[in-house]
Amino acid sequence: MTAVDDRPQARNQALEPEAFEHLASLAARETEGLRLELIGGKLGAKAVPDVIHTAMTMWLVRQCIQQRPEWELSVGQGLKIETYLNGRAIPDGVLAPVNHLVETSRGEWAEPDGVLMTVEVTSFDRDTTQRDRIEKPRAYAESAIPVYLLIDRDTREVTVHSEPDGGVYQKRVIVPFGKTVSLPEPVSIDLDTEQLLTWVQGEGA
C-alpha cells in the first residue's frame, strides 16, 4: 500500500486538531517545558532544549537579523502543517517577514502561508531521527514551506531542504559543520557554520 493510500485511514484515526490544541495547552500549563506536537497523525513531545541547542538557535537568529533585517526568525512559534492530517508542529525557528506572524495568526498556531523557512536543531533524544529527519521534512514540504533547515548535532551537518513539490522537497544539500552553506531563495542567506563546529566538540564523546 502506498503512502498516499494510507493517508485517509491515518486521518480517521488521528487526533482532531481542536482536541490536540486543548491537550497541548493543558500539558504546557501543567508541566514546565512540555511541548506537544501532532505530526503524521501521531502525538509526540518536543525535547526541552539544552544550552547548546539554545545557543545554536540564537546564533541563527542573529545571522538572520544581520543579513536580512526584513525577515525575523521566531523561536517557539507553533505552526499548522500538513494537508491531510491537520498537524501541529513547533519548529525551533520560523522565518517570515517582520510582523507577518503577528498580523496573520490567531492564537498559538500560525498558518504556514507566507513562512519562508522552518528550522530544527536536533536534540539527543530517541525520537530525533524519525521526527526531524523524516517526518518533519515531509510535513513542511506538504505545507509548501520553501526551505527547511536542519542543524544536526549528531551527524555534525547542516541539511538544507528546498523546492517543495508534491509533498516532497526536491532538493537536499548537506554541508558539514565548519563550512559555509548557502540558503536558497527566498531566504538567500550564507551561513558560516564554524561556530557550530566549535560548540559540538566533545559532544557524544
Image: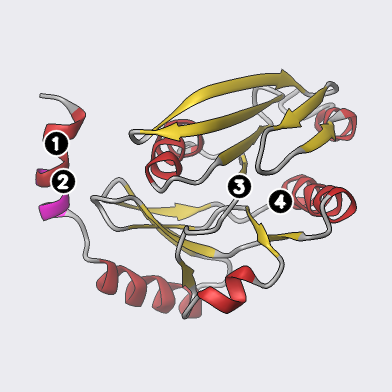
Where residue 167 sits: x, y (%)?
35, 36
User: Which quarter of the picture shows residue 16?
Assistant: bottom left
Q: How many discs appear?
A: 4
Q: Secondary structure at mark 1?
A: helix
Which amino acid type is shown beneath numbered disc 2?
Ala
Residue mark closest to the camera, 1 vs 3: 3
Labelled pair 2, 1 in contact (Cβ < 8 Å): yes
Residue mark closest to the camera, 3 vs 4: 3
Residue at (17, 41) in percent of width and height: 7
Q: Secondary structure at mark 3?
A: strand
- The magenta stretch spans which residues? 9-13
Instruction: Report the residue marked by disc 4.
Output: 50
Where residue 168 sits: x, y (%)?
39, 31
Labelled pair 3, 2 in contact (Cβ < 8 Å): no
Instruction: Report the residue marked by disc 1.
Output: 6
Residue at (49, 80) in percent of width and height: 29
User: Which quarter of the picture shows residue 75?
Assistant: bottom right
Which amino acid type is shown beneath numbered disc 4?
Asp
Which amino acid type is shown beneath numbered disc 1?
Asp
Residue mark closest to the camera, 3 vs 2: 3
Q: Earlier in the sequence, mark 3 or mark 2?
A: 2
- Horizontal arrangement in the rendering, residue 123 relative to residue 127 (left or right): right
Where residue 117 sits: x, y (%)?
60, 47
Q: Which mark is residue 117?
A: 3
User: Which of these two is toward me, 138 or 157?
Assistant: 138
Labelled pair 1, 4 in contact (Cβ < 8 Å): no
Q: Secondary structure at mark 4?
A: loop
Q: Secondary structure at mark 2?
A: helix
Q: Earlier in the sequence, mark 1 or mark 3?
A: 1
Instruction: Report the residue marked by disc 2.
Output: 10
